[in-house]
Amino acid sequence: MQAVILAAGESSRFWPFNSNHKSLFRIMGKPIILYTIEGLINAGINKITIVQGPSKDIKNTLNNYPKYNKYIKYVIQNDPKGMGDALVAAKELLTEQFLLILAERVDSEEIVKKLNFQIKTSKDAAILVGATTDETSLFGILKLENNKVIDIVEKPKKGKEPSNVKALGIYALTPAFLDIYKETKRHQYDFEEALSIYIKKYEIKLMLWDQVSPSLKYPWHLFDIRNYLFGKYIKESTGKNAKISASAEIIGKVSIGDNVSIMEKAVIKGPCYIGDNVFVGNNAILRGRVNIESNCVIGANMEVKNSLILQNSTTHSGFIGDSIVGKDCRIAAKFCTGNVRLDRGTISTEVKREKIPTRHRYLGAFIGDGVDIGIKVSAMPGVIIGGNVTVGPSTVVMKNIPDNIKYYTKFHEVVIKKK
């Protein structure tokens, strides 16, 4: 069987980390899409077509992993017109039953192995993989009858849900689906409409996946992806030429890359990933599933808790909690992220001018690529700072900051002569 990976969308809900496709976000030193590809190959899929955007950012990134080239072909979706249009871009390569899968399905190996077994023991035209959810308004929800899928409803309103089973982003389809899609009127959810018609025309069975299966729509979903990958892959290890002070404490499963320096009295509590060429300063604390990518600096007296920091970013002192920091950021001394509401309630944030409940009680800041932050800056829970932003010193970030902005508090000097 062959697989089609969809990786051409704008990832607009993934702002501020959507300068590239969201599946190129790095965790444990690799882009997310690579975990999906490796999983498919391990599950016996040896023909993979990737639908990417015109920037070819997926191919340009995966060229750094040449051993996978023999499995992959690329096609381009020129405009991000949805899943159906992306699939049409790959039409000429689809001559048999195929898997349609989202690029961020890091659990593809386990799911596809089970799906392969069901395909071999069944004569169904198609199988949809589903999982239960209590966030029905975020997904396509399946209408079921005797373990068969009879319809799909995209993002149903509360009280209108046909079930609590979401489409997981893995579909076993036949080329006949493309014929149905061709006759479907183009609109935002034309893929789901064509799928609904396809479901009613053919016998479609459900494969219910009953394990935790992380999705990736919003930036905070990266914590779930990180947790899954840490649980599966992280091991205690120390790379070449790593220098660890005798007074530093390394506790639990900590993966330390090449040429890492960990200074005196630093404390690192696993599970934790530290990439190549990272510097961890004196008295720094890393705790609670921290992921630090290559060439970062965690300065003296900096505490990082349950956060992801991308490559080439530097910090000084302060607290970064339950946060995500993009590439090439420079964060000055005494930076602090608020990560808990005063009333200890769940935290919401604004995405595409819509207030979205994150369902997290502990959530810090999301900081885009290339951000410069001055001394004594603090950020409120759930705020998003766009890419290429400069935040002036002693500023409190109370709301989202768009890309390419200088944002600071205006100071008013007061000089009074003493009597």
Image: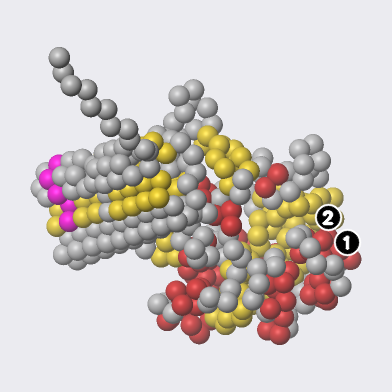
Circle 2: element type: strand
Whether the magenta-drawn stretch holds residue 208 is answered as: no
Between residues 345 and 236, which one lies in front from this camera angle? 345
Does the magenta-highlighted stretch encompass residue 263?
yes
Q: Residue 70: x, y in percent?
A: 50, 85
Disc 1: which residue: 200
Q: Residue, x 70% and y 44% (percent of image)?
A: 136
Please, what is the three-letter code of the amino acid marked with disc 1? Lys
Expressed as whole percent of the image width and height from the top left, the position of residue 355 reads 61, 40
Name the foreground residue: 83 vs 207.
83
Q: Quadrant of the C terminus?
A: top left
What residue is shown at x 19% (from left), y 44% (from top)?
A: 300
Placement of 49 over or under 409, stated as above or below: below
Q: Secondary structure at mark 1?
A: helix
Which labelled disc corresponds to residue 151? Answer: 2
Cβ–Cβ below 8 Å for labels 1 and 2?
yes
Q: Dot 1: few (<14), some (14–19), or many (≥20) neighbours within 10 Å? A: few
Instruction: Name the residue at 49% across, 63% down.
Output: 19
Across and down, in percent, residue 320 comes to 34, 41
Q: Indicate the position of residue 95 as horizontal and vertical percent values.
A: 73, 83
Tell me where residue 111 sits by quadrant: bottom right
Specify start and end residues of the magenta stretch as a single range: 261-265
